[in-house]
Amino acid sequence: MLRVEMGPSQRGAALPASPIRRLMPLAEGARRRGRRIHHLNIGQPDLPPPPSVLAALRDADQERLVYAPSRGLGEAIEAWCGYYRHHGLEVEPGDVLITSGASEAVPLALRATCDAGDEVLVPEPFYAPYKGLAAVADVRLTPVPLGEDFAPPGAEAVRARLTPRTRALLLCSPNNPTGTVYGRDELAALGALAAEHGLFLLADETYREIVFDGPPAASALSLPGLDEHVVVLDSVSKRFNVCGLRIGAVVSRNHRVMAAMLQLAELRLAVPAIDQRATIGALAAPQPYVEGVIASYRERVEAVVGALARLPGVRVHRPAGAFYVVARLPVDDAEAFAGWLLRDFALDGETVMLTPMADFYATPGRGRDEVRVACVVDAAALRRAIEIVGAGLAVYPGRAPGR
């Protein structure tokens, strides 16, 4: 029989690899060689979740291993509504759809609000997996550069990127990876632009409470007169340190869009019922747990910013929220440097895994010398990791000339 090589579809072949996980084969090789790796590449914090989460998982039994409703368990939806009321935001159960993390919420929202070939404006740098999620939804991401020092873009900068195919504006506040926080006035100006041009405002609020100086970031749900435009994408992963539960939500008062998303959600049947139940207690009583989380991240971010600032040739951005730090390194190619750390370098048997930033941009050539550091371990471990990075930079053969 003639053997024919079967390849993937054009869509499958064109999907961008995750910059957060792309270097994992090199990390596995380093581990096999006996090296200890400081994983600062992925937003997987080491903080324990609220006790209520662990108690609910311990109490789970086989009688609960049934399909949940596609929208989500009624008691879990009520817990989400209560969580938003805690922050002064009124939403009804019909405004909430529980998802498998924000990673499902994003493509559900894109498919329910955009047609094939539509354009979605997104300030860059942005969460790198947006690229793949948009590609699967067959929509195009159009970048709008953040301002100086990663400041939020003004409405006029966004307006300049509008085309007849623009359908939505996708924001993340606080931003992953930059920690940029949109003030209420800045968010309101972009909301007004969305209303003026008939656009959806897709607001990724996964890190909304993790702000280091001031109250939580303003929610798009708080903007008056925009109920038809606003779709919030949310997750419990970061504020409650339960990334593995994969529980998120889409929240919108646009009932036609919510009905479309529910139809899409019915195709995957349900989100695990046990995982939904495990989040109810945390959503019902987020404080003081979240306050402690913010304090931990504030300490960790300051440790990383301080350590990086002391390295020759490194330029570091101090974030206003989330728990990532973006640094510009004195190297020709940050991805090559990150790979070299894993493949060729160790300090006393230790090395570091970083995330290159180029794929957090849609504009070719941007971010080539930048990395994202995830502040997911304690301050002492973070300082040690940056010490290793500094030692590596001192001997790296691909340093940029003059830096």
Image (cartoon, grey):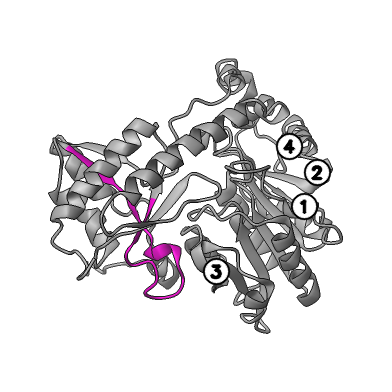
As helix, strand or loop, the secondary structure at mark 3 comes to: loop
Figure quadrant of the N terminus: bottom left
In the foreground, 121 or 132 = 121
Residue 221 bears which disc, if any? Answer: 1
Whether residue 274 is visible, yes or no, is: no
**Disc number lying in front (4 or 3):** 3
User: Which is more foreground, mark 4 or mark 1?
Assistant: 1
- Residue 4: x %, y % from top left: 26, 69
Residue 24 shows in this picture: yes
First to last magenta residue range: 350-372
Q: Which residue is mark 4?
A: 80
Labelled pair 1, 2 in contact (Cβ < 8 Å): yes
Q: Quadrant of residue 214?
A: top right
Cα distance between the residues tagged 4 and 1: 14 Å
Question: Which comes sooner in the sequence, label 4 or label 1?
Answer: 4
Mark 3 touching mark 1, by CB under 8 A?
Answer: no
Q: Nearer the viewer, residue 334 or 12?
A: 334
Mark 2 belongs to which amino acid?
A: Leu
First of labels 1, 2 by sequence position: 2
Classify residue 385 as left or right of residue 171: left
Q: Nearer the viewer, residue 377 or 263?
A: 377
Q: Amino acid at mark 3?
A: Gly
Q: Residues within 10 Å of mark 3 (few under 14, many from 20)?
A: few
